[in-house]
Amino acid sequence: MSTDETTTVVAKPKPVKKLKPARKQVKAGDVERKETPQTGKEYNIWYNKWAGGDREDNYSNKVKSQTRCNIKKDSGLTRANTTGIRYCCLFYARGCCPYGWECDYLHTLPDPDNALPDSSKDCFARDKFSDYRDDMGGVGSFNRQNRTLYVGRIKETGPGPETEEIVTRHFKEWGEIERIRVLQYRSVAFVTYVSEFGAQFAKEAMACQSLDNDEILNVRWATEDPNPVQKVAEKRRLEEIGQEAIKARMDPRIVDAMRAVRALEDGDMLDDEGEVVEDSESRETGDPEPKRRRIELPPPQEATPPQPLGLLSADTMEGLKYFAEIRKRNGVSLAVINPKTIPPKPLTSGLGVADYGSDEED
């Protein structure tokens, strides 16, 4: 006699990797600071360039960044993990922070699930502005949640899918990507992240970097997508985020009370957890439980006014009856004239001039 024995193998949970102290990305003096060549007479600190210079000259004067952030090697613990600061280090994103574990800001990717204390600042604690710059660079605007980056000056060496794969491989390191659109033969790509924090971090991390062909990328904020489908989807996404934020701040007791009131109005039954109870018959048949019908009162019937009789109106007849009752109480009889007993006046033919006569007869 043999018995079948089944053995269950329980998978061991993977140990959570603890962060080590952040390393210093560069040493003092490793990065050579090169001043921007003068192409104008005045230097504009807002656009970080010389005023009066040509726009193409501004791009041609850009040099490739000397450093680049490596998330696997550079991420670690800093002083911000003990002080509670939620903002990331800007120089860590650019790959040139010389402080390492002594830095006052985080050396990790921004967490999309944790909201920042101030929505008017980006993930690097820089103040946003009411509008974008003319060149769509800089920090950005607090009037619109922008998750899309414009990536220009890409060197295309193959078809569109190959270029999309290269862009995805380089940009997915900074956060979860929702979609990528490559404009073939125009050296342009649009990268949309799931979180705005990922787009903010990637914009600084990939500025003046190269992909696979030693180019110098031009990374800036993208303008609003004119596609109506994307506009509707973005509006719906923002509404869902707002609803989740409101639910998180509301007292759960108020939510349960509102749910109970709505169920009472709809005629549903709630269990202890606040869920709608389904009938056993509806579970077997698969049909939804029929709701209890509300008690509806019949609509009030409008009183029909009494119809007039003969020559006298209904109001006149009511008045005569009222005065007859008064006279009867006072002992005085009043004969009520029935209009039906009065014979109608015979109709006369013609104009009726024969009934009239003159005083003098010839």
Image (cartoon, helix red, strand yellow):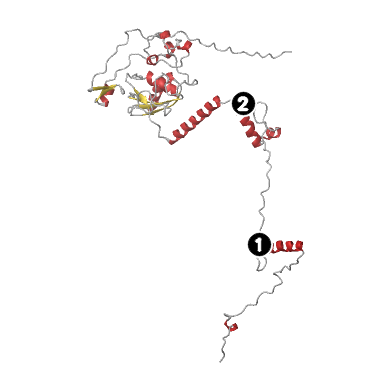
Residue type of the residue flagged with mark 1: Asp
Q: Quadrant of the N terminus?
A: top right
Instruction: Point out residue 7 in the picture as x, y percentages from the top left corner.
Output: 65, 13
Instruction: Point out residue 184 in the picture as x, y percentages from the top left corner.
Output: 35, 29
Residue 38 shows in this picture: yes
Instruction: Point out residue 178 in the picture as x, y percentages from the top left corner.
Output: 45, 26
The disc at residue 112 is none
Mark 2 or 1 closer to N-term? Answer: 2
Check whether the beta carbons of the residues at disc 2 and disc 1 lie within 8 A of each other: no
Q: Secondary structure at mark 1?
A: helix
Count residues near mark 1 (Cα–Cα under 10 Å), then give few for <14, some for 14-19, many for 20+: few
Left of 94 or right of it: where is 241? right
Q: Give the residue furthest to the left.
A: 41
Q: Residue at x 48, y 30 (%)?
A: 238
Q: Give the residue furthest to the bottom.
A: 362
In the depicted structure, whether residue 286 falls above or below residue 112: below
Q: Which dot, 2 or 1, sits closer to the camera?
A: 1
Q: Give the residue furthest to the right.
A: 331
Residue 361, picture quadrant: bottom right
Q: Quadrant of the C terminus?
A: bottom right
Count residues near mark 2 (Cα–Cα under 10 Å), then give few for <14, some for 14-19, many for 20+: few
Read off the residue under disc 2.
253
Residue 354, picture quadrant: bottom right
Instruction: Point out residue 19 in the picture as x, y percentages from the top left corner.
Output: 48, 10
Read off the residue under disc 1.
315
Residue type of the residue flagged with mark 2: Arg
